[in-house]
């Protein structure tokens, strides 16, 4: 579906709908990466001047145009250690509904690291906000996974003028961590991430898929080859180990009581329609947090997927796409 932006500022949100929860299985297939662009859809009006939280850092993106120039825009933020290709399967199923913009967060994929090397959830969100401001995007459908979900949540809380709807896939909201999550947290220790450099790319991918997929057999040869090439490329980047460790520490800090409010407090501030996607067999995010998250947001829909781990958009993209398409169709510009 496509929608035209209404004139003037968007009107008030409609009455809060009844929360819904859905469980659905489907199939998965690997995709080759989409073409990478640094220029995006022109012609959108700039957000009216107001107090903004942004970071002026260029970001590498992949853009898939939608069905027509007036269609809404969906923006995708990957998780820790991820990149734009993580969204390829989902974008392939959504691009007939919206323009799709996948973003490499600072220091990941092909985006340069922050000049000062500091990685926090808030600064990742501010960098995305700055990119959207510069490109003239407004009222986007914001989608995030894992660390990217925390960044999306932070952006929606701090810059509600930029967000029409919010979709969080396995958000790493503060909770008692799983044993696997504790092991990942150890990568935040000084020098720990460099231990990965001694492992072969094949070993790294085997360990990764066992961690984030409920069934690693779902990973096709094409997807594995694409991700192996990306890991080989990143192995040549001198900043990559430090950025990965900083990203781990950013997730850990998000679980601590710090000034500015916890992610749970931010969730209660979100007024836009929100889709929550949880895999029942996620080894990193406890499934028990799904019901708490569903209750925390004012206008929430919950999709739970059996036999799915931490990356539902890769493991079972079809039900995720169906839920996201429905969300966009019902709130094309946040109206």
Image (tube, rainbow, N blue to C red):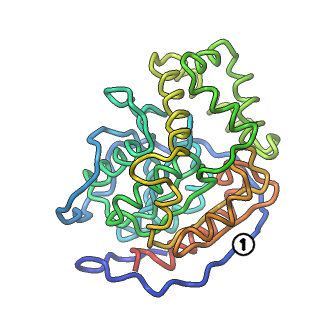
For this view, does 32 lie left or right of residue 58?
Answer: right
Q: Quadrant of residue 156?
A: bottom left
Residue positioned most to the bottom: 15
Residue 229 position, x and y percent, is: 60, 26
The front one of 194 and 220 is 194
Residue for point 76% across, 67% down: 24
Residue lying at the far left in this picture: please name it: 49
Residue 249 vs residue 195, the one in the foreground: 249
In the rendered image, the vertical position of residue 199 relative to residue 181, given as above or below? above
Residue at (56%, 58%) from the top-left corner? Answer: 168
Apparent side of residue 210 relative to residue 251 in the rendered image (left or right): right
Residue 230 coordinates in the image, percent (x, y): 57, 28
Residue 147 is drawn in which quadrant?
top right
Q: Residue at (57%, 50%) from the top-left corner?
A: 145
Quick check: 271 above or below 305? below
**Eyeballing the image, is 313 above or below 228?**
below
SS assignment at label 1: strand
Quadrant where the C terminus sits is bottom left
Local packing at callout 1 (Cα closer than 10 Å; few below 14, some 14-19, many 20+) is few
| Residue 321 vertical position relative to residue 172 in the rendered view, above or below | below
Q: Residue 9: percent from the left, percent from the top?
A: 25, 76
**How many numbered circles does the render carry?**
1
Which percent across, then down, holds residue 314?
67, 49
Quarter holding residue 58:
top left
Q: Label 1 belongs to which residue?
A: 22
């Amino acid at each position: 579906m496509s929608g035209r932006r209404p004139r003037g500022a968007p009107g008030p949100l409609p009455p809060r709908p009844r929360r819904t929860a859905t469980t659905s299985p489907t199939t998965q297939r690997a995709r080759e990466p989409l073409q990478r662009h640094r220029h995006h859809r022109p012609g959108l009006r700039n957000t009216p001047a107001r107090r903004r939280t942004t970071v002026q850092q260029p970001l590498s993106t992949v853009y898939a145009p939608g069905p027509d120039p007036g269609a809404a825009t969906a923006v995708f933020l990957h998780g820790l250690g991820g990149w734009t290709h993580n969204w390829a399967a989902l974008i392939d199923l959504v691009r007939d509904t919206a323009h799709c913009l996948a973003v490499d967060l600072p220091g990941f994929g092909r985006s340069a690291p922050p000049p000062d090397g500091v990685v926090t959830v808030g600064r990742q969100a501010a960098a995305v906000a700055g990119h959207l401001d510069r490109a003239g995007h407004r009222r986007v459908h914001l989608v995030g996974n894992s660390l990217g979900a925390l960044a999306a949540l932070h952006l929606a809380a701090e810059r509600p003028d930029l967000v029409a709807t919010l979709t969080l896939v396995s958000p790493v909201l503060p909770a008692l961590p799983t044993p696997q999550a504790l092991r990942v947290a150890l990568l935040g220790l000084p020098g720990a991430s460099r231990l990965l450099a001694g492992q072969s790319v094949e070993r790294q991918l085997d360990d990764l898929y066992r961690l984030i997929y409920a069934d690693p057999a779902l990973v096709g040869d094409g997807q594995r080859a694409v991700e192996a090439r990306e890991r080989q490329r990143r192995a040549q980047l001198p900043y990559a180990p430090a950025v990965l460790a900083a990203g781990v520490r950013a997730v850990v800090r998000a679980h601590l009581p710090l000034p500015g409010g916890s992610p749970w407090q931010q969730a209660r501030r979100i007024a836009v329609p929100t889709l929550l996607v949880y895999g029942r067999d996620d080894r990193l995010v406890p499934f028990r947090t799904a019901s708490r998250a569903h209750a925390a947001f004012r206008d929430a829909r919950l999709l739970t997927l059996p036999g799915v781990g931490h990356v539902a958009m890769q493991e079972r993209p079809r039900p995720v796409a169906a839920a996201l398409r429905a969300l966009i169709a019902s709130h094309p510009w946040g109206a």
